[in-house]
């Protein structure tokens, strides 16, 4: 399938803030960031997001050896929401351009995960190998980037095939426009967010509201799954291919879309 890279409804953002400007903004906000999130009810709302059935299903494959990556980790609040929703710790990595934010993230996360790897860096150039993570998450960082699809492609690059990307952004609207005077971000409509995830190569993309109060009006979340390339490209024309596919189908927790894809291939084989 050919993926289009142009999203007509999300025009290029020529006046996006520079990385230096954002870094200064968030360096200055870091000390009060957790209080700020608490005042907005965002900490509880992140928990609610990760406790939604659709999100839990996407994360049911995580075990104590799993690695997750939080892009634009800030003080670690979004990771904490994920960690609160699963029964065991996982290995957490995080990337952010603000050193003070990372210092707070270290404090907040160090006793909550099996290993913690926080790095200063830009999520548009992640310092990780392809196909490295069992889940990638992000909250309220995409709004700052001039080319969201290019950034999302980088997140998808480090995601394992079949693994989910889960993110939250600010909803486009009057509230977001007023907030942008301080935070220099732009908002998304649901269809724009979904289009960005699809253009970045994800499948089974869906967006949804979450939380109560502030988040319910101001935020949108979305999930997408990285396609299992090997399966998608397989032609079932030999017994070996079919044997491999049947073995793969017995593995637990594969996303619905991939199961449908499997059925499609099987039907094609038996026609
Ligand atoms: C609105 S805060 C959100 C922090 C955290 N995800 C949360 O939900 O509390 C945005 C974060 O993204 C970081 N950030 C902005 N642009 C970035 C980039 N290009 N690469 C990495 N981090 C970035 C900022 O330093 C800041 O910590």
Image: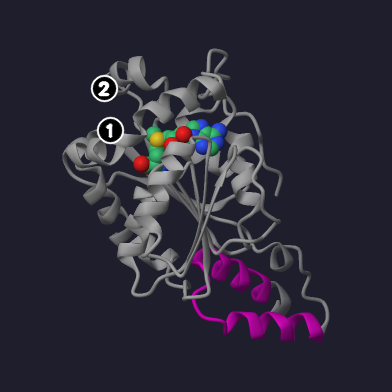
Along the line of sight, the residue nearer the viewer: 57 or 39: 39
Q: Ligand 1 is found in which quarter of the picture?
A: top left
Magenta highlight on residue 252: yes
x 57%, y 29%: residue: 7
Q: Which residues are magenta?
A: 239-267
Q: x, y (%) of residue 208?
A: 34, 46
Q: Would residue 9 appear left or right of 128 to someone viewing this image?
A: left
The image's colour scheme reads one colour
Q: Is residue 112 above or below residue 197?
A: below
Which quadrant holds residue 235?
Answer: bottom right
Q: x, y (%) of residue 177?
A: 33, 17
Q: x, y (%) of residue 198?
A: 57, 44
x 42%, y 52%: residue: 106
Which quadrant holds residue 125?
Answer: top right
Q: Would residue 186 appear left or right of 122 to someone viewing this image?
A: left
Q: Which mark is residue 175?
A: 2
x 49%, y 27%: residue: 23
Q: Would residue 26 appear left or right of 200 to someone viewing this image?
A: left
Local packing at callout 1 (Cα closer than 10 Å; few below 14, some 14-19, many 20+) is many
| Label total for image | 2
CB under 8 Å between discs 1 and 2: yes
Could you say whether the residue bearing mark 1 is in a helix, strand or loop? Answer: helix
Task: Examine the rendering and report whether any part of residue 188 can be seen.
Answer: no
Q: Which residue is mark 1?
A: 218
Q: x, y (%) of residue 196?
A: 54, 37
* Image quadrant occupied by the C terminus: bottom right
Magenta highlight on residue 18: no
């Amino acid at each position: 399938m050919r993926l289009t890279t142009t999203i007509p409804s999300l025009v290029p953002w020529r006046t996006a803030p520079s990385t230096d400007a954002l870094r200064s903004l968030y360096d200055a906000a870091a000390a009060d960031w957790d209080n700020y999130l608490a005042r907005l009810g965002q900490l509880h709302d992140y928990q609610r997001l990760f406790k939604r059935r659709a999100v839990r299903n996407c994360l049911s494959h995580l075990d104590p050896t799993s690695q997750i990556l939080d892009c634009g980790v800030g003080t670690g609040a979004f990771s904490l929401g994920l960690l609160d929703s699963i029964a065991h710790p996982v290995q957490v990595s995080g990337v952010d351009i603000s050193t003070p934010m990372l210092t707070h993230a270290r404090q907040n996360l160090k006793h909550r995960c099996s290993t913690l790897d926080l790095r200063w860096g830009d999520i548009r150039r992640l310092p990780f190998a392809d196909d490295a993570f069992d889940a990638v998450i992000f909250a309220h960082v995409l709004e700052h980037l001039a080319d969201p699809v290019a950034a999302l492609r980088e997140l998808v690059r480090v995601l394992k095939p079949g693994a989910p990307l889960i993110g939250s952004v600010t909803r486009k609207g009057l509230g977001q426009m007023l907030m942008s005077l301080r935070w220099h971000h732009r908002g998304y409509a649901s269809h724009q967010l979904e289009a960005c995830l699809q253009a970045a190569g994800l499948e089974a993309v869906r967006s949804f509201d979450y939380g109560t109060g502030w988040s319910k009006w101001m935020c949108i979340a979305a999930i997408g799954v990285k396609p299992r390339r090997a399966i998608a490209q397989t032609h079932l024309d030999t017994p070996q291919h079919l044997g491999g596919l049947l073995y793969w189908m017995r593995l637990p927790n594969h996303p619905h879309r991939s199961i449908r894809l499997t059925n499609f291939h099987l039907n094609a084989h038996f026609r």
